[in-house]
Image (spheres, grey):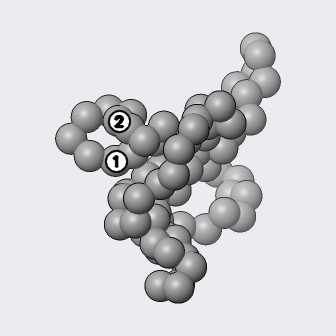
Amino acid sequence: MTGHGVGLEIEEDPQLAPTAMGKLDACVPVTVEPGVHLPGRGGVRIDDTLVVRPEADGGPELLTMTTKELLAL
């Protein structure tokens, strides 16, 4: 799964996945969570939350304002 709807339940509809069918409605909040997982080593996932908006209204509105740059801790 690539992402899902945001609301009162965990991982609620709409589901965002290569096999998902349908159209996203405007003003729906969703997560986009691409990730890489290496068996036995770990992984990383970048979670963003956005609001679906039509291209005429400027396209998706990103709500997550964090850097995507690699940080060494």
Q: Nearer the viewer, residue 57 or 31?
A: 57
The front one of 16 and 50 is: 16
Q: Which callout, 1 or 2, points at the residue further toward the start of the chain?
A: 1
Quickly name the residue at label 2.
12
Quarter residue 21 falls in: top right
Q: Residue at x 58, y 35 (%)?
A: 20
Residue 44, quarter of picture: top right
Residue 73's mark?
Answer: none
In the image, what residue type sits under mark 1?
Val
User: x%, y% of residue 71?
Assistant: 68, 58
Q: Secondary structure at mark 2?
A: strand
How crowded pointer 2 is (Cα within 10 Å; few <14, some 14-19, many 20+) is rated as few
Q: Is residue 14 left or right of residue 34?
A: left
Q: Which residue is mark 1?
A: 6
Residue 21, above or below 47: above
**Residue at point 25% right, 34% down?**
9
Could you tell me if residue 47 is visible in this image?
no
Quarter of the image with the N terminus in it = top right
Residue 56: percent from the left, percent from the top?
53, 85
Number of residue marks: 2
Report x, y in % for residue 73: 64, 51
Under mark 2, the amino acid is Glu
Crowdedness of circle 1 by 10 Å Cα count: few (<14), some, many (20+)? some
